[in-house]
């Protein structure tokens, strides 16, 4: 039986390196999403971990997050409401009073994650906003912003952005 020589590229990789890389990626994603939501100033607290973010979602985001995400994404109130599967009137009311509901905060987080990923993949806010609003063949002709009203749709959009970022067919 012939012994296959070990590949030098894989033999020098420490399993802990992969863990550190993934942790760094999660921290970078968290920072980008928190930035799209308005950061500490708007959220009223420091969100350093995913646990912090989960707690903030459960408590409900402050209404100023809606304005921040509209600005970051380049969306109108109607487009934002459609992407969140909410009525524009309900979203307008929430902007004037109290905290957002848990499900609304969760949907805002999902959209902020897509906006941050689009900006990272496409280079800037303007390109990301334009890409989000245009129909996309990889999404069956649907504009990405119209696909993110469900978790499954958001994952499809993330997959397309991943292919764009890493040079795959999209």
Image (tube, rainbow, N blue to C red):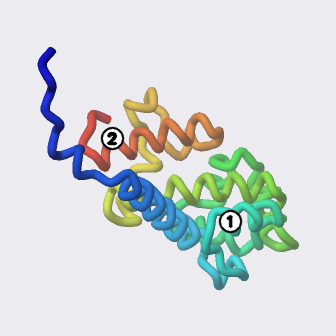
> In the shown orientation, is residue 169 left or right of residue 62?
left
Q: Position of residue 54 (x, y in %)?
A: 72, 61
In percent of the image, x 35 and y 65: which residue is there?
A: 124
> In the shown orientation, is residue 61 left or right of residue 23?
right
- The residue where tag 1 is placed is 53
Q: Position of residue 62 (x, y in %)?
A: 77, 73
Examine the rendering and report whether any part of residue 105 can be seen.
Answer: yes
Q: Residues within 10 Å of mark 1 (few under 14, many from 20)?
A: many
As drawn, 36 above or below 90: below
Furthest residue in direction front, as rendered: 1
Alpha carbon of mark 1 to alpha carbon of mark 2: how far?
Answer: 27 Å
Q: Residues within 10 Å of mark 2 (few under 14, many from 20)?
A: some
Furthest residue in direction right, as rendered: 98
> Residue 163 got which mark?
2
User: In front: 153, or 59?
Assistant: 59
In percent of the image, x 43 and y 39: which residue is there?
A: 159
Regarding mark 1 in the picture, which secondary structure is present there? helix
State which quadrant residue 59 falls in.
bottom right
In percent of the image, x 63 and y 48: which residue is there?
A: 83
> In the shown orientation, is residue 12 left or right of residue 119?
left
Examine the rendering and report whether any part of residue 129 can be seen.
Answer: no
Q: Quadrant of the C terminus?
A: top left
User: In front: 46, or 153?
Assistant: 46
User: In front: 148, or 142?
Assistant: 148
As drawn, 157 above or below 113: above
Q: Position of residue 158 (x, y in %)?
A: 47, 44
In percent of the image, x 57 and y 36: which residue is there?
A: 153
């Amino acid at each position: 039986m012939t012994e296959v020589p070990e590949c030098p590229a894989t033999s020098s990789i420490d399993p802990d390196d992969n863990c550190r890389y993934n942790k760094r990626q999660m921290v970078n994603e968290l920072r980008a999403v928190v930035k799209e939501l308005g950061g500490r100033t708007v959220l009223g607290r420091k969100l350093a971990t995913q646990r912090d973010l989960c707690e903030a979602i459960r408590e409900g985001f402050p209404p100023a997050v809606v304005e921040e995400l509209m600005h970051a994404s380049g969306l109108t109130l109607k487009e934002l409401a459609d992407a969140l599967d909410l009525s524009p009137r309900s979203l307008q009311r929430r902007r004037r009073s109290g905290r957002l509901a848990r499900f609304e905060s969760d949907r805002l987080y999902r959209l902020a994650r897509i906006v941050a990923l689009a900006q990272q993949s496409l280079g800037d806010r303007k390109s990301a906003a334009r890409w989000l609003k245009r129909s996309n063949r990889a999404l069956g002709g649907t504009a990405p912003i119209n696909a993110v009203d469900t978790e499954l749709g958001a994952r499809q959009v993330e997959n397309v952005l991943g292919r764009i970022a890493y040079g795959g067919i999209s």
